[in-house]
Image (cartoon, rainbow, N blue to C red):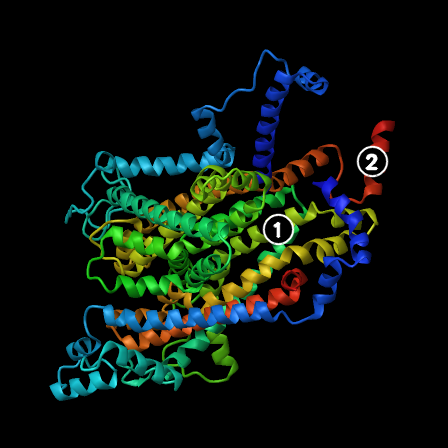
Amino acid sequence: MTAIDSSLQTQEPDAISAGTTATTAVKGRGRVPWRFLGNRALFYLFTLWAAITINFFVPRLMKGDAVDQYLARNRNVSPEAADALRALLGLDTDKSLLQQYFDYWNLLLHGDLGVSLLHGLRPVTEVISQALPWTVGLVGFATLVAFTIGTVGGAIVGWRRGSRLDALIPITTFLSTIPYFWLGLLAIALFSVNLGWFPIGKAYGVGVTPEWSFEFIGEVIHHGFLPATTIIIASLGGWMLGMRNMMLTVLDEDYVMVAQAKGMPNDRVLWRYAARNAVLPQIQSFALSLGFIVGGTIVMEMVFSYPGVGKLLLDATNAKDYALMQGVFLVITLSVLLANLLADVAYAFLDPRTRQTEA
Amino acid sequence: MTAVNDRTAQNDGAALDADGAHRQAGVPATATVRTSQRPASTPPRKPTFWSKLGSAFAMFRNPKSIAGLSILGFFVLVAIFADVLAPYPPTRIDNTARFQPPSAAHWLGTTHIGEDVLSQVIHGTRGVIVVGFLAAIIATLIAIVIGVISGYLTGWRSESLSALTNVFLVIPGLPLIIIVASMFDDPPLILIALVLGLIGWAWGARVLRAQTMSLRTRDFIQAARANGEPMRRIITVEMLPNLMALIAASFVGTVTAAILGLTTLSYIGVIPVTTYNWGTILNWASAQGAFRQNQWWWYLPPGLCIAAIGVALSLINFGIDEYVNPRLRSAGERARAMKKKGMNVNDTVTVVRTNTKTQENA
């Protein structure tokens, strides 16, 4: 391998002076990769269409009718009112499936996600926008912290390879293989029930109204501590293992050895040379994990009865509240797609090779 | 990557051997030099079925993988012989023995209606193992077919298969399973495995596609194509052996994901409680307040079992990782070897030199 590499390196200047493909690649660096962007845009549009279509069909394949469930809960609704409800929810069977599909798209494009039966016929958008800040705030914070600790820790573990720090890898991996809901339940049993340090679940205490005061913010932090910590513990292992494995690969590269041979301080070699290159795949998976912030915390919100989007989806599924279910699934899918887009853009900016291969 | 290089190196070696045999017949001068290196009395051994099988599972031949496989094997045996091993039927109600802590009669205590927790855990192994492996087999088969074909083909067919993979990669899995599972009143385990498999194949397909694309341009594939071998044969005979480690890794990863998915769904209560698995036990324990009343014998064992299987699977994956990327193992070993000589792997070159000098002086 090294022999081939060195021969390639000696050839490179010749190739550039001779004006071969190497020069065009160098010149093409600053150009906007239109073809790449076009392909990605096409992919996102297609995925969006697929997700929305799944979203449209799934509730219609389900057994049981939202209105039947609603009638079972509220006895004093007349049959006429039930029919009106069906019409309101777009569930009247007079229309063909195709017509319903177009109606669905039409409403969607107008930002109308229907009304939620579970929440007293309030608009779905309103219900979701109330739950979204809790999920994004708590899980976003926890993901950011886990990513930072895991990446910095993984870089140090990879740098000090062969030392006792290597033991951190199996430990954090173990913590990430135990099921999250069990970890959460254990944390509640230990810290909330037995020690009484933290309240059991919920985002803030009963009878407290949300407001921008230090008292309320303190309460939110107090309630959010256990959920956030368990998420960090459970997701740390993946970040650390990924970074450490990339570090070990990068540290074997010639440029790291050259940097060390030049007598550069170790700190500089570690962070500016090795870690800077090893972090690229990490940043991409970080952008991807941002998408799962909204959807991936259903279990956490169930265990801690946190008033977020995941709990909304669970409650909606149990009550067969289709409109809310569709709305939540749509929000989750949109956030995943947005995060993927972010990952693409970040990668194109950070790794010039992505642009070069296109040019 | 490096493992594949090793494999191709082996292939090159085999080609050389064949060349050597040819030259022996013609006896040019260089051939005698070559054959003199290897005694003529031992002709290169032909790969038998067993040696081929052995090299196909080479990624498991390291302490980490063997330890992981042993733990996994233990659980598989428990799942097979659950009827023999369990001291009681898992759902036998005993009203005289409620909420009992572990004792000689009930090694792991009893539940709120006097069911034996140990028997439930033993019987619960079955559902977890069956669903985990079934889902992983389904997912891996889809991943191989889609990944290898989309990596081998070019043009719009490759791109459209890749787009399909990406769609499945970004569609959020757990919410979708919850919605799909709630369509059925009593979803059978096979259906759960099918859904988990259908949702979990995309990552493996993406990895296999990338590796196949890189294999496609290698010399031995080009040679096979030049020989006029059909695509079916190139993929199954030439490519699949070089993809075995990645296939194994994606299989193990899917088993982990499927087991976590199954237990989580059972805990949430999406899967009915008629079929016992570890998640169902935890669902009951949580519903009956075992976590609030410190009935640790009820909620600790199932969780620890899931963790044990998770550890076993990640040990296997560590082993495969180190086989695929030997730097992961050798980096630590080299650093430790240098430490023994009194050197630090991260020291600059000059420091290392003074160290060797002092050692020579001493």
Q: Is residue A111 above or below residue A134?
A: below
Residue for badge 2: B355
Three-letter amino acid code at disc 1? Met
In this picture, residue A10 sits left or right of residue A238: right
The answer to whether residue A310 is visible is yes
Q: Dot 2: what SS?
A: helix
Q: Residue at x 75, y 53 (%)?
A: A269
> Which quadrant: the N terminus of chain B?
top right
Q: CA distance from mark 1 to mark 2?
A: 30 Å
Q: Are marks 1 and 2 on the same chain?
A: no
Q: Position of residue B253 (x, y in %)?
A: 44, 48
Residue for badge 1: A246
Question: Which chain does tag 1 point to?
Answer: A
Q: Position of residue B244 (x, y in %)?
A: 47, 40
The answer to whether residue A222 is visible is no
Q: Residue at x 64, y 17 (%)?
A: B26
In this picture, residue B14 sits left or right of residue B187: right
